Image (cartoon, grey):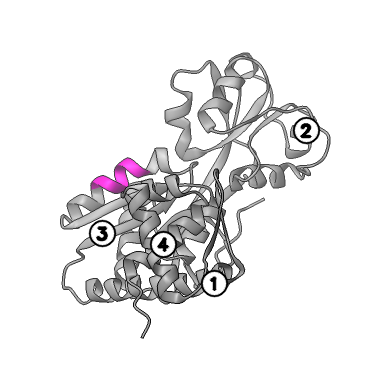
């Protein structure tokens, strides 16, 4: 019988993800020599080299590459055992890992955490802010229990629950306040400021303008909505931001905010989790708390998709 511990599997998974002993050790909250010793013992137990080591980084051997997905399957199953035990409790207890996209987290997170803490006082809530592809990956790997993001994500392994929809508003310099609100066609000809590649909100804004991301255009990219609004305040261009962000991001900026004519651009915000999660019933209850935190009525939900944003 091969004597490999769950701790060693977790260390190996961290090392495969980070590609560096120092960063993996930090993520696992142990010393680098201790991590190295555990990996060496795992290699001896399995009878094969898992890593190619160099001064700056590590790379998986062919054996390591074949093993890492099996290791992650094992770790996911172990996490689901814990979820199964939590689901059996009358009260929702234990640790809950929630992911949120950056265009939602700063505006919704404080109310969500406050309301969840009051509703489930024994719940230890851990939050991760990241872009949608990273959240989907961490859900698949069992490192997140659920994520709040823009729908649809169209992942067959995930359950999607639509929470609410919100419109996108136009932010432009204050001196333009009395000028007509541009149409989507007119917006294509303006200097449109957008978030960097990788943000789903960028793709949604481009879709409204019927503009290709790769097409030549005069625009500057930013990594936050706050930076976009400040760039507009400086007279550099115009931008779109979701309605939930308006109060926070425009309160100290010399900008004006306007609504587009119908049909207004919008997005659907929802929660997703693994179909195999034993916490599905509890997560559905949490989705109700999220809606209350946003001051919205629950949107219509469906399992493998949600209504696409209005264009």
User: x and y percent of residue 147 in the render?
Assistant: 43, 57
Disc ID at residue 175: none
Disc 3 target residue: 95
Disc 4 target residue: 39
Q: Which numbered disc, 4 or 1, marks the residue closer to the eye?
A: 4
Tags 1 and 3 touching, CB below 8 Å: no
| Marks 1 and 3, how far apart at CA | 26 Å
Nearer the observer, 220 or 290: 220
The local secondary structure at tag 2 comes to: helix
Give the magenta-colored segment's residue range. 109-114
Q: Which numbered disc, 4 or 3, marks the residue closer to the eye?
A: 4
| Marks 4 and 1, how far apart at CA | 39 Å
The local secondary structure at tag 1 comes to: loop
- Sequence order check, earlier mark of 1 and 3: 3
- Sequence order check, earlier mark of 2 and 4: 4
Horizontally, is 268 left or right of 4 in the view? right
Magenta: predominant secondary structure element?
helix
- Sequence order check, earlier mark of 2 and 1: 2
| Marks 2 and 4, how far apart at CA | 59 Å
Disc ID at residue 304: 1
The local secondary structure at tag 4 comes to: helix
């Amino acid at each position: 019988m091969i004597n490999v511990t769950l701790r060693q599997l977790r260390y190996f998974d961290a090392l495969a993800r980070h590609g560096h002993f120092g960063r993996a050790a930090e993520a696992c909250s142990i010393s680098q020599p201790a991590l190295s010793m555990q990996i060496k013992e795992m290699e001896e137990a399995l009878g094969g080299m898992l890593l190619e080591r160099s001064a700056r980084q590590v790379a998986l051997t062919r054996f390591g590459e074949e093993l890492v997905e099996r290791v992650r399957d094992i770790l996911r199953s172990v996490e689901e055992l814990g979820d199964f035990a939590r689901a059996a409790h009358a009260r929702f207890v234990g640790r809950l890992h929630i992911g949120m996209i950056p265009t939602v987290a700063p505006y919704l997170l404080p109310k969500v955490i406050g309301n969840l803490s009051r509703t489930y006082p024994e719940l230890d809530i851990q939050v991760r802010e990241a872009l949608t592809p990273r959240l989907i990956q961490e859900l698949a790997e069992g490192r997140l229990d659920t994520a709040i993001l823009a729908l649809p994500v169209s992942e067959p392994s995930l359950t999607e629950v639509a929470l609410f929809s919100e419109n996108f508003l136009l932010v432009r310099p204050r001196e333009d306040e009395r000028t007509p609100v541009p149409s989507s066609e007119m917006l294509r000809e303006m200097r449109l400021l957008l978030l960097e590649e990788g943000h789903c909100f960028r793709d949604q804004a481009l879709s409204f303008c019927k503009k290709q991301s790769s097409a030549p255009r005069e625009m500057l990219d930013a990594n936050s909505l706050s930076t976009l609004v400040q760039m507009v305040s400086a007279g550099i261009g115009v931008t779109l931001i979701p309605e939930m962000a308006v109060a926070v991001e425009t309160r100290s900026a010399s900008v004006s905010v306007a609504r587009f004519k119908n049909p207004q651009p919008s997005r659907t915000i929802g929660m997703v989790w693994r179909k195999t999660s034993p916490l599905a019933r509890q997560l559905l209850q949490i989705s109700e708390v999220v809606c209350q935190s946003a001051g919205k009525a629950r949107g219509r939900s469906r399992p493998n998709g949600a209504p696409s944003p209005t264009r």
